[in-house]
Image: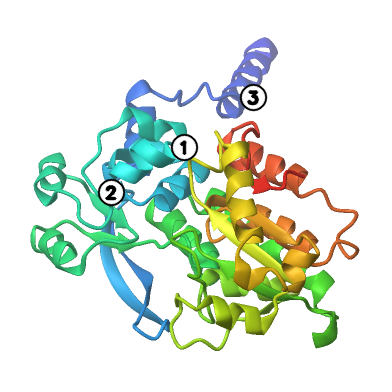
Amino acid sequence: MKKKICFLMIFVLLMSLLPAFGLANPVKPEDSKQKQQTENKQEKIIVKEQLLDEKGQIIEDEVSILAPPKKVVVLGCYGAEMLKAIGVENTVIAVDDYTKEKNGWPDFVKNIPSVGASNTPSIEKIIELKPDLVIEGFLDPKLKTQLLNCGIPVLKIYGYRTELITSEIETLGKVFKCQTRAHEYANYIEKQWQAIRDRTKGLTEKDKPKVYWESGLGDWKTQSYGSGAHSLIEWAGGINIAADQKLSYPTVTPEWVASKNPDVIIKYVDAPITGWNGDIKKLEEIRQQILNRPALKNTNAVKNGRVYLVSSKITCAPQGAAGEWYIAKWLHPELFKDVNPQSIHKEMLKKFYGQEYKGVWVYPVQ
């Protein structure tokens, strides 16, 4: 009798331990599949997109999206770059011509079709692809209306407005249900900017060099208050000589720039002259052309050789946090003498894009 009782006690004890080892209720393949389906289940969500009005002021709108989207058309290289960084590039089924052919990065864009120009894509091609979402930065408003009328949601992601970049990344994290990765990415960018601002916040106006920032869109095209470049100049401890211009992206005269006598000239240059396959010879030609402009010959910037070229992809862009370190060091070499901007850029590329550093991103090369 005692043996039977002892046996029963052991049996009960063993049965009580089965759940701990996952043996009482083993996970069936169909249960695991059902869990995966639940995680990937799409649902309607409302997200706020940030838009800029004619005065450059930020306004908000609401967009209803089936999240997470499984088929996405991206019109704009910065949107594609952000999706790569948060790990959802596999959802992109098409991009625009510039992103695929001229920019050609991230690498995944080379293997998917294009639907035309980013501002005037083929609406017919987009509709044929039946996307869950279109992400755009430059789309013609009339074409956007056509997509909306076809039931295709459209989300504005500028990617080049410095003050909006981190919030746009967080929005994408919500849309694609990858908030943790998106927050890590946005937080990394903000920490870089803040580290620079912490160093320059004690500068007096006398300590700040005057900066002429020239667009890659043409000679004498600059950026004023409300532009992404203006924020970068201020955070790096400089004074934007075009800050008071009425337009965000004005064209100024040579005489006007000369009268402002900038201490530093920065011109951003687009791909493929800068970037992964940068052309040093061409960059030297561009810099020399600036140095040789008659209107600039007596400026402090030219006399002291403080003329720099930088890739547009590391300025007013998702990688702008890396480019800002270069700018800060150009403006205040002593204040940032312990900083190696290239090493920070390398870290960012490896951490968020899985990419090794290569190419020419600034000139003169540091």
Q: Which mark is residue 13?
A: 3
Q: Amino acid at mark 2?
A: Gln
Q: Residues within 10 Å of mark 3 (few under 14, many from 20)?
A: few
- Image coordinates of residue 21 in percent, x first then y, are 60, 23
Q: Secondary structure at mark 2?
A: loop
Q: Identify which residue, 312 or 111, lies in the foreground.
A: 312
- Image coordinates of residue 43 in percent, x first then y, are 27, 54
- Residue at position x 62%, y 20% in the image: 14
- Residues under labels 3 and 1: Cα distance? 57 Å
Displayed quadrant of residue 278: top right
- Image coordinates of residue 199 in percent, x first then y, are 83, 70
**In this figure, which residue is indicated by the disc labeled 2?**
42
Quadrant in the picture for the N terminus = top right
Q: Which mark is residue 106?
A: 1
- Residue at position x 45%, y 26% in the image: 25
- Residues under labels 2 and 3: Cα distance? 44 Å
- Residue at position x 54%, y 67% in the image: 162
Which mark's residue is nearer the viewer, 2 or 3? Answer: 2
- Residues under labels 1 and 2: Cα distance? 26 Å
Q: Which mark is residue 219?
A: none
Q: How many marks?
A: 3
Q: Is residue 209 above or below residue 190?
A: below
Q: Amino acid at mark 3?
A: Leu
Tell whether label 1 touches label 3 (CB within 8 Å): no
Pointer 2 or 3: first along the chain: 3
Q: Secondary structure at mark 3?
A: helix
Tell whether label 2 touches label 1 (CB within 8 Å): no
Inspect this view and state whether residue 35 appears.
Answer: no
As drawn, is 195 to the left or to the right of 274?
Answer: right
Quadrant in the picture for the C terminus = top right
Q: Amino acid at mark 1?
A: Pro
Pointer 1 or 2: first along the chain: 2
